[in-house]
Amino acid sequence: MDLTVRRLTTDDAKDIYEMLQELPADENGFINPVHGKTYDEYKLWLKKAYDDSVQTGIIDGWKVPGTVFWLFEDGKPVGFGKLRHFLTEKLLDAGGNIGYSIRPSERKRGLGKRFVAKLIEEGKIIGIERLLFTINNNNTPSIRVALANGGVIERVTEERHYISIVLKNE
Ligand SMILES: CC(C)(COP(=O)(O)OP(=O)(O)OC[C@H]1O[C@@H](n2cnc3c(N)ncnc32)[C@H](O)[C@@H]1OP(=O)(O)O)[C@@H](O)C(=O)NCCC(=O)NCCS
């Protein structure tokens, strides 16, 4: 099985669009803005998402830079992930640095764990020093994925688990 991760590009095409229709619009707080949108709207979103990845500062007091990644298994898109390059106070509370989703038809085969392992490597390339996961307490699969990748539980509130991984030791 060949598993690869690639950054979003403005040339992404129909195969990714189809995956994004299969993934819900909001699942446990991970947002898929393309669900239910037309192909033309998807192409416009790709441009916006690309711009977000090359942004350097905070826009409008809240919008931080973020990069979208796709997971491919033997050439077929099976996962959608996102890394926020740094966080605001609000994102430290809910959102965190990392979000991910595996195509519903492809879940429970270990892809979630392997996708996050690859996103961690991408996070190092971006220069993220401490990667924060904020995960709803009822989202067992996601908590397991974070812990399997070396995540350390920092605290648990009534709503969520805060799990982190240090990517840069100095
Ligand atoms: C979270 C998610 C990416 C996991 O993907 P996956 O490919 O199914 O994950 P894996 O196959 O690597 O499984 C990881 C672990 O969760 C367990 N698991 C998977 N689905 C499960 C379920 N529905 N209930 C209980 N445990 C589950 C697996 O058995 C495995 O456990 P292990 O550590 O004992 O081996 C996937 O469930 C998903 O896309 N969820 C919706 C989006 C989401 O919630 N994203 C995270 C937001 S913070």
Image (tube, grey):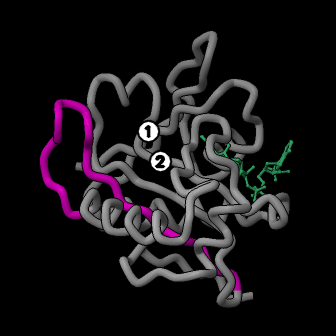
Quadrant occupied by the N terminus: bottom right
Q: Position of residue 76 (x, y in %)?
A: 68, 83
| Rendered location of residue 11, percent (x, y) | 40, 84
Q: Are marks 2 and 1 in contact (CB under 8 Å)?
A: yes
Residue 66 sits in which quadrant?
A: bottom left
**Hey, what amino acid is under mark 2?**
Ile
Q: What amino acid does circle 1 point to?
A: Leu
- Total marks placed: 2
Residue positioned 67% across, 72% down in the render: 18
Vertical comparison of 57 with 133: above or below: below
Which mark, residue 88? none
Residue extending farthest to the top is 158
Q: Earlier in the sequence, mark 2 or mark 1?
A: 2
Q: Which residues are magenta?
A: 54-73
Which x, y percent locates residue 69?
47, 67
- The response on whether ligand 1 sits within 8 Å of label 2 is yes
Question: Is any part of residue 112 visible from this angle?
Answer: no
SS category of the residue bearing label 1: strand
- Give the CA separation, mark 2 to mark 1: 7 Å
Q: In the rendered view, does 24 fall on the left or right side of 116?
A: right
Residue 16 appears in which quarter of the rendering?
bottom right
Give the number of the disc on residue 98: 2
Q: Residues within 10 Å of mark 2 (few under 14, many from 20)?
A: many
Q: Nearer the viewer, residue 151 or 43?
A: 43
- Answer whether residue 61 is magenta in the image: yes
Is label 1's Cβ within 8 Å of ligand 1?
Answer: no
Identify which residue is drawn at 49% across, 62% down: 119
Instruction: Identify the residue position indicated by label 1 in the image.
Output: 132
**Left or right relative to 110: residue 148:** left
Residue 47 higher or lower than 76, as above or below: above
> Residue at image x 22%, y 49%?
170
